[in-house]
Image (cartoon, rainbow, N blue to C red):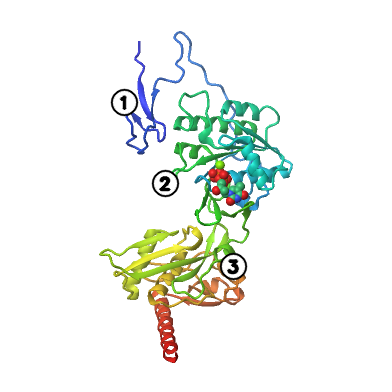
Amino acid sequence: MARREQSFICQNCGAAYGRWQGKCDACGEWNTIAEESSATARPSLPGRAPRKGRLFALEPLAGDAHEAPRLACGLAEFDRVTGGGFVRGSVLLLGGDPGIGKSTLLIQVAAALARGGHRAIYISGEEAVAQVRLRAERLGLAGAKIELAAETSVEDIVATLGEREPPRLAIIDSIQTMWTDTVESAPGTVTQVRASAQALIRFAKRSGAAVILVGHVTKDGQIAGPRVVEHMVDAVLSFEGEGSHQFRILRAVKNRFGPTDEIGVFEMTGAGLREIANPSELFLSERDLGSPGTAVFAGIEGSRPLLVEIQALVAPTSLGTPRRAVVGWDQSRLSMVLAVLEAHCGVRLSGHDVYLNVAGGLRIQEPAADLAAAAALVSSLANAPLPADAVYFGEISLSGAVRPVAQAAARLKEAQKLGFARAVVPEAARSEGGGSESGLALQSVSSLASLVSDIAARGTRAARADRRAVGDA
Ligand code: TYD
Ligand code: MG
């Protein structure tokens, strides 16, 4: 008789081992290795011919490609991120820190959908029905026609959801609390999460209902449980925000049916999440006018222009190795900008600590922020406030040149809309941005060095004015 081969498979990354161990060497996760039989799943019985494959029809690629029918929930900021609404039978994973507002967001989404006359079901595995009701009441949604349950058994949930006409949207809050009979491990374990997700995804594909799975995020920002769930679902959304700030950003990390660079902006208020249709106003609302070290960056997030303040502090260091700390921007981009300032602009920073912060807890990924970051840094070092009515954008190359960036016209238009009067931009943006049409005075800079000398000149002027003021007194 053939010996049944046993092997040990990491349930997180799929690495195989000859014997059990506590930690997976491949992905570094603990307690994810489980014993699996490597024999074929259903060995053919002796004496019986192996099952012949069922024939299925192959379809041509060119054909009736009926556009995935979408169902917009009515919450514009949410629909923007999903790419225009829920696709039939699609499964979304919503991740975020505990307490960030996932349950709040989803109950609002469900209510918006129910208001449109669609059937929406909310299954909570973490809270009792009474608690969910209490929250809905607080949000002023008590009258919404959402169907509720507090359940954790996937088999029961799938049976109930599939009983009548399937809902248009089913929310499972959260996937880590779900468990299925088909596997033995405890709820929340990798195996359970994966099997439960699989069952729910199968349900979605079969019934055409859109399913949202809520996923908790671990300390290092990963959606807890197997990364494979991220591969299994159609879209992964992440709900982010700084604890101390009231606004929240919804971002698509992966989206099979839409863009991944759109963001939705919300503000957490006493009555739930409020949509912010014009985020620039929010990010600039607490501006510290007239102090050195701040520059407004005209950015683009997805298809939308977004103005944010970049703050820098450059101060003499008392340490052997000066500190470089950055929040909301890329550490290596900061290092690059600092290197260019030293190498090409004569700015000595080796004796200074440098702190850079993107106001409001936003995270910027665009290289177009280089120019604004550099302006803020030099402004802080020279103690020279930048003009309060100016915005900055442009990419800095290692040679110290300021390079053009995409969508200059949209950036300028947004700046004008918010009352800015001038823009410091790469040379090419002047023609491309439509110059005079934007209504802004454009100052084009071809090299970082010229911007630095401009700001330094402002600093000396300001210092002279200060001395005069002191002399007068
Ligand atoms: P919740 O949606 O329960 O977070 P999650 O499901 O992501 O864990 O939101 C909890 C937080 O939101 C809590 O700290 C209180 C705050 N909150 C408000 O500020 N206003 C509200 O109207 C609601 C419902 C919650
Ligand atoms: Mg919750």
Q: Residues within 10 Å of mark 3 (few under 14, many from 20)?
A: many
Mark 2 → mark 1, Cα distance in angstroms: 29 Å
Q: Residue at x 48, y 15 (%)?
A: 50
Q: Nearer the viewer, residue 158 or 103?
A: 103
Q: Choose mark 3 or mark 2, whichever is in front.
A: 2
Q: Choose mark 2 or mark 1, whichever is in front.
A: 2
Residue pointed to by mark 3: 414
Q: Residues within 10 Å of mark 2 (few under 14, many from 20)?
A: few
Residue pointed to by mark 2: 220
The tag earlier along the polypeptide, 3 or 2, is: 2
The tag earlier along the polypeptide, 2 or 1, is: 1
Determine whether 444 is above or below 1 in the image.
below
Q: Residues within 10 Å of mark 1 (few under 14, many from 20)?
A: few
Q: Nearer the viewer, residue 198 or 128?
A: 128
Image quarter (top left, top right, bottom left or bottom right) of the C terminus = bottom left
Where residue 226 sits, quadrant-wise, is top left
Residue pointed to by mark 1: 19
Badge 1 amino acid: Arg
70 displayed left or right of 407: right
- In the picture as drawn, the residue positioned furthest to the top comes out as 47
338 displayed left or right of 132: left
Q: Does dot 1 land on a helix, a strand or a loop? A: loop
Determine whether 60 is above or below 78 in the image.
above
Residue 273 x/y as whole percent: 61, 52
